[in-house]
Image (spheres, grey):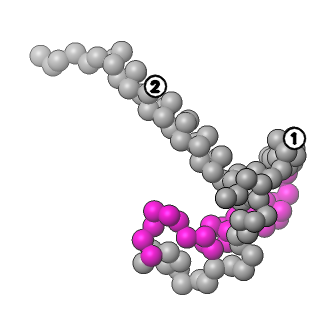
Amino acid sequence: MRKPRDFDAELKALGDKARGLRTRKVQQLGELVIVTGADSLSADELAGALIVLAETTDTGKREAWARRGAAFFQGRPRRNAPASERNADGAPPQPGGSQPASGRKGAA
C-alpha cells in the first residue's frame, strides 16, 4: 500500500512558492522602474502612463514599444551574465538605449 500524500503540506509549499514568486515579480518591476529612469516620474505620472499602455490596442505602437524595450535590454549588459554571453547575436548595443545616471532622481 502506498504512503498517503500530505495534501496540506503540499498546499503550504505551493503557497510559499507563489508568495516568493509574487515578491520577486514586485522587486523586478521596481528594479525596472529604476533602471529605465522612470523613478524620476511621480506615482501619478507613472500610473497614468502604464494605464495608457495597458489600454492601447494599436498593434503598431505596441510592437514599436517592444522593439525599443528589447533594444534597451540588449544595450545594457546583465550583471549575472558572463561577458561571453552578452550580445550573443552579434548586434552592437543600440545608441541611446540606456539612461545616464545623472538624469535620474536619487542616483548615486
Q: Mark 1 and mark 2: span between their CA atoms?
A: 32 Å
**Quarter that holds the N terminus:** top left
User: Within the image, what quadrant is residue 97 found in?
Assistant: bottom right
Percent across and percent down for residue 18 are 49, 32
User: Within the image, what quadrant is residue 65 found in?
Assistant: bottom right
Percent across and percent down for residue 49 are 85, 49
Name which residue lies at 53% across and 65% down.
78
Name which residue lies at 50% across and 64% down.
79
* Circle 1 residue: 44
Above or below residue 66? Residue 3 is above
Residue type for callout 1: Asp
Q: Secondary structure at mark 2?
A: helix
Between 58 and 12, the one lying in front of the other is: 12
Residue type for callout 2: Gly
- Whether residue 6 can be seen here: yes
Instruction: Verify whether residue 68 appears in magenta.
Output: yes
Q: Is residue 77 left or right of residue 48?
A: left
- Whether residue 38 can be seen here: no
Q: Residue furthest left?
A: 1
User: Within the image, what quadrant is residue 77 found in?
Assistant: bottom right
Q: Main secondary structure of the magenta part?
A: helix
Disc number for residue 15? 2
Give the extent of the magenta segment.
55-83
Percent across and percent down for residue 45 are 87, 46
Total residue callouts: 2
Mark 1 packing: few (<14 Cα in 10 Å), some, or many (20+)?
few
Q: Are marks 1 and 2 in contact (CB under 8 Å)?
A: no
Nearer to us: label 1 or label 2: 1
Q: Residue furthest front?
A: 108
Name which residue lies at 36% across and 15% down.
8
Percent across and percent down for residue 70 are 66, 67
